[in-house]
Amino acid sequence: MATCSFTLTVKLRGATVTLQDPIVAIATAPGRGAVGIVRVSGHNLQSLTQALCARDLRPREATYTAFLDADGQAIDHGLALYFAAPHSFTGQDVLELQAHGGAVVLQLLIARCLQAAAQPDHAGRPLLPRLRLAQPGEFSERAFLNDKIDLTQAEAIADLIDASTEAAARSASRSLEGAFSQQVHRLRDALIDLRVLVEATLDFPEEDIDFLRQADASGQLASLQQQLAALLQRAQQGALLRDGIKVVIAGQPNVGKSSLLNALAGAELAIVTAVPGTTRDRVQQTIQIEGVPLHVIDTAGLRDSDDEVEKIGIGRAWDAIGDADVVLFLHDLSRMDAIDYEAADAGIATAIGLKMPKNMRLLEVWNKADVAPLTIPSTGLVVSAKTGAGLDALRRELLAVAGWQPAGQGTFIARARHLQALRRVKRSLTDAQHCLVSELPALDLLAETLRLAQNALNEITGEFTSDDLLGAIFSSFCIGK
């Protein structure tokens, strides 16, 4: 793959930098550890390896050596690895120093790299001019800019690091290997074939040849829509694995909200008492069901209160409800026949309905089945947070309302921006179908809708992406990645 051979000065995340500047950073997590890594990327790093290790390094071969300070004294001993461009992660020369994982040692190595780079060579010029500390995600950004990885693979690096479940980690690994990109490229290639047919019809109107009908353009478009539907479904599953769903437990005081949170989490996270209003603030715990993260939030009981602290907690509860993906409206079976209780529940239901965004789901759950009367509600789920009865059915229902389907081996990680792009592709292909089936096909409009669909696909892999989007993506990475 080709590497960048130009020097480009840009405003990168608020700082003016040169993308060909050599960069250095600590690539391991802060704190004590067995091993710590300092990583350098740039062009012509051989002089730096001589200054640090007093020897040349064979490419792609680990060498045990001393890391020397300016006086030739050892800062530490460890492994040095040199990767010559373009055969490296960034596509530039890369030097990795694997030392003992102490914070002071790694900072000394960083300082020594910067000092050695500023030393004059035989001609009086700095060994490595402009060596600077890397910004968050800059190593991965260079890998993307040098065509070593595409944008979905770059994002998968961060998603693999941030994965909160095994299923999310495995899916991010598949995206890093290129599974998502391959699906997008396959769809894009088929779309390009259709665009070629449409453009040929536009370019040669004098030829009495119906390119579209002969090549079964309608069939090709239908096939594209089927491929897109399958890709969108898999991307939605991947987005669930990455982001999970926000589940808010809401209801009147003493219906068992905190007990239900504890039961789902399998730990005593929230205080449970018989005193109404015990929960004053939100308590959150992330659990997983079939690898899908569920961010479960216990809230203060919803009621009128004169207690200032409780009123603040109730206000926060309503805020959480407004931001939820799923609201578990918890009822108390032991009080279901009480007139005051039913009236309060009806008022809460009305208020929740007013706050519900279009994409939020409401799930009614009846708790305290262990002390329930014989009359069981015909709607909603019946559980006992105390005994665990009905919790498995509740877990399955939570996954169902979130749109989760049992994960196969081919699930890949996805982000909200990927889903947005795929939905734009879907709208463009729908518009293209309307153009194609009309009595007088609007070929100019058909060509434009297909072009927009391809641009949206290209945004996913980064082949057509704004600099602002790149800045937003890579600024969320770790330093050293």
Image (tube, helix red, strand yellow):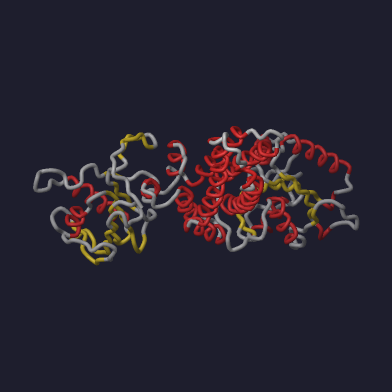
Q: In screen coordinates, is 302 left or right of 175?
A: right
User: Of 282 and 286, which appears nearest the observer?
Assistant: 286
Look at the image and tell me whether residue 244 can be seen.
Answer: no
Q: How many marks?
A: 0
Q: Nearer the viewer, residue 283 or 279?
A: 283
The residue that appears at 25% across and 45% down in the rendered structure is 131
Residue 175 percent across, percent down from the top left: 51, 55
Q: Quadrant of residue 32?
A: bottom left
* Residue 352, x across and y down, in percent: 75, 38
Q: In screen coordinates, is 384 left or right of 33? A: right
At x 71% / y 52%, what residue is drawn?
273
Residue 56 vs residue 445: left or right? left
Q: Residue at x 36, y 43 (%)?
A: 135
Q: Quadrant of residue 4?
A: top left
- The x and y percentages for residue 245 are 63, 49
- In the rendered image of this protein, does residue 357 appear above or below residue 75? above
Work out whether residue 229 or residue 254 is closer to the camera in this orientation and state it: 229
Q: Is residue 418 above or below residue 103?
A: above
Closer to us: 9 or 217? 217
User: Against 310, is 234 above or below?
Assistant: below
Q: Position of residue 346 (x, y in %)?
A: 83, 39
Q: Is residue 445 visible?
A: yes
